[in-house]
Image (spheres, helix red, strand yellow):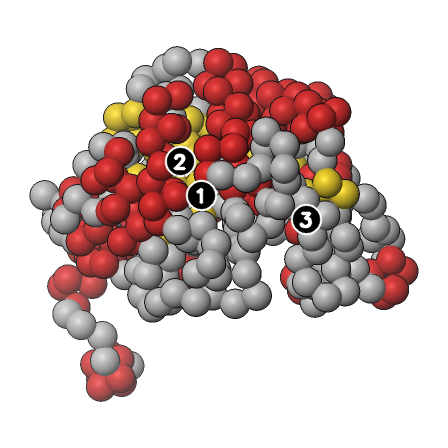
Amino acid sequence: MSKLFTPLHLRGISLRNRLVVSPMCQYEAKDGFVTPYHSVHYGRFALGGFGLIMLEATAVSPEGRITHGDTGLWDDAQIEGMASIATFLKQQGATPGIQIAHAGPKACMQRPYYGDGPLTKEDQARGDLPWTVVSASALPVGDGWLVPAELDAAGIAKVRCDFAAAARRALAAGFDVLELHCAHGYLLNSFLSPLTNQRTDEYGGDRQRRMRLPLEITRELRDIWPQNKPLFVRLSAVDGSRAGVSIEDSIAFAQELAHIGVDVIDCSSGGVGRSYEHPSGYGHQVSYAEQIKQATELPTMAVGLIVDPHQAEAVVTSGQADLVAIGREALREPNFALRAEQILNAANPERPFDSWPRQFGWWLNGRERKLRQLGPWSAATAESAT
């Protein structure tokens, strides 16, 4: 029996398998509102058999967007579109999740397909105008980037309120999993990292004070998010630079999150530092998920160049992580989960398409019977048939 295809129970939610679509920004929202593109994009992963589908980093305020194309939950009017997506995912047997985020010093940048850097005159001509960005400290991401304003007490209070309000809207939209984004150099990661946090108040200095704001927000989200629904936190287990956040820092942070009632640690890496100074091959972040799981006894989610069903199966079978998040490979193959089920012999051998959506599974089961009669296809057999 494939462990990857055994359900995972988290509080009152049961995931049909351990495969997750990782949150990946699409930059196709209009003023924070989802569009028909998002409905089709996320719907195909539900049809593709994934257990949990995590919507992309969704800004808690307009100024918290990475780009002008980010989705948002800062306005009650944005709930309806999100609810439509969540409802469809549930109808197809998948669990809908959403990641809420604030881009901090990485806000107000180009959409990646226009350059993936600071806004230019060409971007502004397209209507993507700059706004004031904020961070833990007034340190730009790099040369040519906007210099962020250091958040003062009022700004910190606003950020906390924005996250809380977005969580309530996510609940109203019908999501079953909420994830707090504390990774990749965005706002909450900028507080956690000693490379970007040079504050001298109660939110800066030693590790405990750098963790203060992310922990305060997590406590508020846990109070808002129902006790029968799981709360995830995505963190950068290590910064891009070895001088930044270490795995020991992230273990200490995860232990605090466990005390609050977080259910899963989503283990990514990088985002702070001019380059990535760690190994970056296949499954390069799995070891972080394993170390945090062992130190905290919390379920973890592994992500990062996991591209093969056997590779994903080995992660959960070995106990390195409880969930496997698939990102770019899911974009390449939205049916990754359904194909993995067949490759790992978790499907009904006589009717291998029974777990596919019924609208086309029955077609494929019928064709499979015919294909078995014919044997493997080859150019020679095709030519002889004509």
Q: Position of residue 232 (x, y in %)?
A: 41, 32
Find the distance from the CA under tag 2 to the CA under tag 1: 9 Å
Labels 2 and 1: the sequence-earlier one: 1
Q: Residues within 10 Å of mark 1 (few under 14, many from 20)?
A: many
Q: Residue at the spot x=47%, y=58% of the render? A: 243
**Residue 339 occupies quadrant:** bottom left
Q: Residue at the spot x=59%, y=29% of the render? A: 202
Q: Which residue is mark 3?
A: 105
Labels 3 and 1: the sequence-earlier one: 3
Q: Position of residue 362 (x, y in %)?
A: 29, 44
Labels 2 and 3: the sequence-earlier one: 3
Q: Position of residue 28 (x, y in %)?
A: 68, 49
- Decide which of 82, 354 is in the foreground and name it: 82
Amino acid at dot 1: Leu
- Decide which of 169, 153 is in the foreground and name it: 153
Secondary element type, mark 3: helix
Q: Residues within 10 Å of mark 2 (few under 14, many from 20)?
A: many
Q: Quadrant of the N terminus?
A: top left
Q: Position of residue 336 (x, y in %)?
A: 34, 54
Secondary element type, mark 1: strand
312 is higher (above) or lower (below) than 179: below
Amino acid at dot 2: Phe
Q: Which residue is mark 2?
A: 253
Amino acid at dot 3: Pro
Q: Which residue is mark 1?
A: 235
Is the residue under label 1 in contact with that under label 2 (CB below 8 Å)? yes
Q: Is residue 171 at all visible to an observer of this figure?
A: no
Q: Is residue 189 at all visible to an observer of this figure?
A: yes
379 is higher (above) or lower (below) than 371: below
